Image: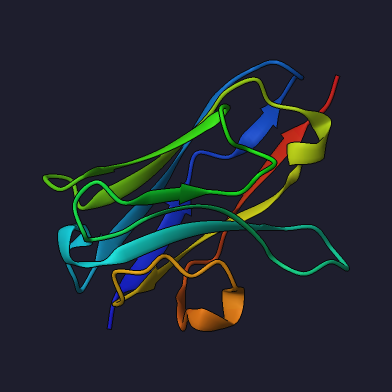
Amino acid sequence: QVQLAESGGGLVQPGDSLRLSCSASGRTVSSTTVVWFRQVLGKEREFVAGISWYPGRTKYGDSVKGRFTISRDNAKNTVYLQMNSLLPDDTALYLCAAGTRSVIETTARAYENWGQGTQVTVSS
């Protein structure tokens, strides 16, 4: 079973950038589909981005397209989420999850393995 640990969150101002990391153990990220969701208290988890183990396959939520980029470093067994042009609406707990299918599912119930999350707060 894969274990995931997120890091990189923090307090930033609107327009700033952050890079989140999702470090994996127990399975290589090159053979795993890894996704990022975010959650605000009282709301359902929202799909942010995903990268499949199938080469070249990525997917983004509509609210982050053009601003966020997901990538993978196989040597570090880590998946990154580069977040640019951050908005106050991006404030949330960001969680990564892992799956075995090549298809990038955008519903949270499709994933069993989750990290604890890292908080991102965008505020002036």
In this picture, is 56 found above or below 42? above
Q: Nearer the viewer, residue 18 or 105?
A: 105
Q: Is residue 75 left or right of residue 122?
A: left
In percent of width and height, residue 117 lies at 57, 59
Residue at figure coordinates x 63%, y 38% from the top left: 64
Q: Is residue 38 left or right of residue 123?
A: left
Quadrant assignment, res 67: top right
In percent of width and height, residue 94 lies at 61, 53
Count of marks, rendered view? 0
Snapshot colouring:
rainbow
Residue at figure coordinates x 29%, y 77% from the top left: 100
Q: Is residue 2 left or right of residue 62?
A: left
In this picture, is 82 found above or below 42? above
- Looking at the image, the residue that sits furthest to the left is 75
Residue at figure coordinates x 58%, y 35% from the top left: 65
In percent of width and height, residue 103 lies at 36, 69
Please state, as top left, top right, bottom left or bottom right, where the N terminus lies in the image. bottom left
Q: Nearer the viewer, residue 65 or 119?
A: 65
Q: Is residue 45 left or right of residue 118?
A: right
Q: Nearer the viewer, residue 71 or 78?
A: 71
Residue at figure coordinates x 24%, y 46% from the top left: 56
Please state, as top left, top right, bottom left or bottom right, where the C terminus lies in the image. top right
